Image (cartoon, rainbow, N blue to C red):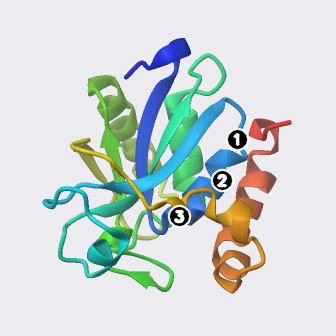
Amino acid sequence: MTQTNQNLAVATLGGGCFWCLEAVYDDMRGIYSVVSGYTGGQMANPTYEQICTGRTGHAEVVQVTYDPDVVSYRDLLEVFFTIHDPTTLNRQGGDVGTQYRSAIFYHDEAQKETAESLIAELERAKVWDNPIVTEVTPLATFYAAEAYHQDYYANNAYQPYCQFVVQPKLAKFRQKFAEWRKG
């Protein structure tokens, strides 16, 4: 695992709009920080407007810094596969485009192996009718999104998108993983 200060580790995940993932992981115990951003594309320092064109190749992602003594990388992935549909190519609900693809950007071989192993388990269990299309790719450069995207749900919980798209994913997490919530 990639280590940072205080024995923390980092995971980078894309599962549609980063606001949804950020809200869920912000509510999870063992999480030190969640930063919305972009990775997986060809352009340096992309803006939100540029990635929304679908021409930069970037995915909307969250970079989650967590304490592996409290929550494992596999735990993070179990939540990830619960709160988005990993069987839809380049879309999540009404959000369509390569920037909304399901993707795990691994930081090291251990993360890659964990991701591939869990995907194989989920496929064998036939959790979904359709095959998982989540890409498992090495992390290149991560770019933090603009400031107004950070803590978006916390700052805009009553905005319609948050009410109709983010809130149901957060509720699903809170119901299925109640023991993993902060507090």
| Rendered view: 182 above or below 144 | above
Q: CA distance from mark 3 to mark 1?
A: 19 Å
Q: Quadrant of the C terminus?
A: top right
Give the residue type at disc 3. Answer: His
Q: Residue furthest right?
A: 183
Q: How busy is the neighbourhood of tag 1: few (under 14 within 10 Å), some, or many (20 plus)?
A: many
Task: Name the residue rendered at 74%, 45% in the picture.
Answer: 177
Q: How busy is the neighbourhood of tag 2: few (under 14 within 10 Å), some, or many (20 plus)?
A: many
Q: Is residue 36 among what the camera can see?
A: yes
Mark 2 vs 3: CB contact within 8 A:
no
Query: Residue 25 vs residue 138: left or right?
Result: right
Q: Position of residue 182 (x, y in %)?
A: 79, 38
Mark 2 vs 1: CB contact within 8 A:
yes
Looking at the rendered structure, which numbered label has been put on residue 149? 3
Task: Name the residue rendered at 50%, 62% in the picture.
Answer: 18
User: Reading the chain from its start, which is encountered first: label 3 or label 1?
Assistant: 1
Q: Nearer the viewer, residue 47 or 79?
A: 47
Q: Position of residue 175 (x, y in %)?
A: 80, 55
Which residue is denoted by mark 2 in the rendering? 24
Query: Residue 13 vs residue 81: left or right?
Result: left
Q: Nearer the viewer, mark 3 or mark 1?
A: 3
Q: Position of residue 165 (x, y in %)?
A: 64, 77
